Image (tube, helix red, strand yellow):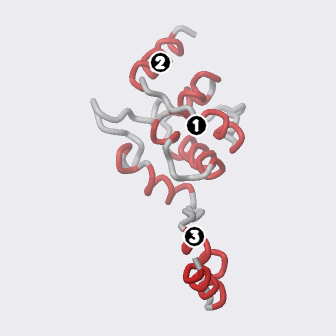
Amino acid sequence: MTGYRTFLAGVLIFGGGALGAEIALGIETTPAYSARVNYQLQCMGCHGADGSGEAGRVPSIRRTLVPFSLVPEGREFVLRVPGIAQSALNDHDVAVLLNWMARNLSDVPLPDNFVEYTALEVSRFRHNPLTTVKTARERLLRNLLTR
């Protein structure tokens, strides 16, 4: 343990600062990037550069994110899908990312009464990931069509 303490002290003394201590302790830190960059790093691999997804594999968010975001069960669904629920981003960055996606990747215009996602809301739902995403999505789409 003494060697470890010496190493940690060296990190702090020789310019590692708080980040160096976090690295030395093995604490993961997620840098705060812009929402666009977070989309590129966290979402684009599956949903594509424009959010159109991959037919038969990954659904498009272009026509569904905003309608889902307008109803409580839709918002909960969005926050529980695996890409959000298991993201390395913190709750604040997830909220910022979803709001950016709604504004920049949606074919559906944002209504004047659009309620932005918040870190508190993200925190409430994302820690209970969906296990039946396809079934939940189909049910949500049916419910939205009957409104």
The amino acid pointed to by label 2 is Leu
The amino acid pointed to by label 1 is Arg
Query: Residue 56 is drawn in which quadrant?
Result: top left
Bin the neighbour count of mark 3 within 10 Å (Cα to Cα): few under 14, some 14-19, many 20 and up: few
SS assignment at label 1: loop
The numbered mark at residue 56 is none
Q: Give the mark toward the camera: 2 or 1.
A: 1
SS assignment at label 3: helix
The amino acid pointed to by label 3 is Leu
Residue under the point 56% across and 32% down? 128
Bin the neighbour count of mark 2 within 10 Å (Cα to Cα): few under 14, some 14-19, many 20 and up: some
Query: Residue 67 is drawn in which quadrant?
Result: top right
Residue that extends furthest to the front in the rendered view of this protein: 1
Q: Give the mark toward the camera: 2 or 3.
A: 3
- In front: 36, or 110? 36
Q: Give the mark toward the camera: 1 or 3.
A: 3
Q: Are marks 2 and 3 in contact (CB under 8 Å)?
A: no
First in residue order: circle 1 vs circle 3: 3
Image quarter (top left, top right, bottom left or bottom right) of the N terminus: bottom right
First in residue order: circle 2 vs circle 1: 1
SS assignment at label 2: helix
In x, y percent, where is residue 22?
Answer: 60, 71
Looking at the image, is 18 positioned above or below residue 64? Answer: below
The numbered mark at residue 126 is 1
Give the alpha-carbon distance from disc 2 to disc 3, as whole Å: 45 Å
- Residue matched to label 2: 141
- Residue matched to label 3: 25
First in residue order: circle 2 vs circle 3: 3
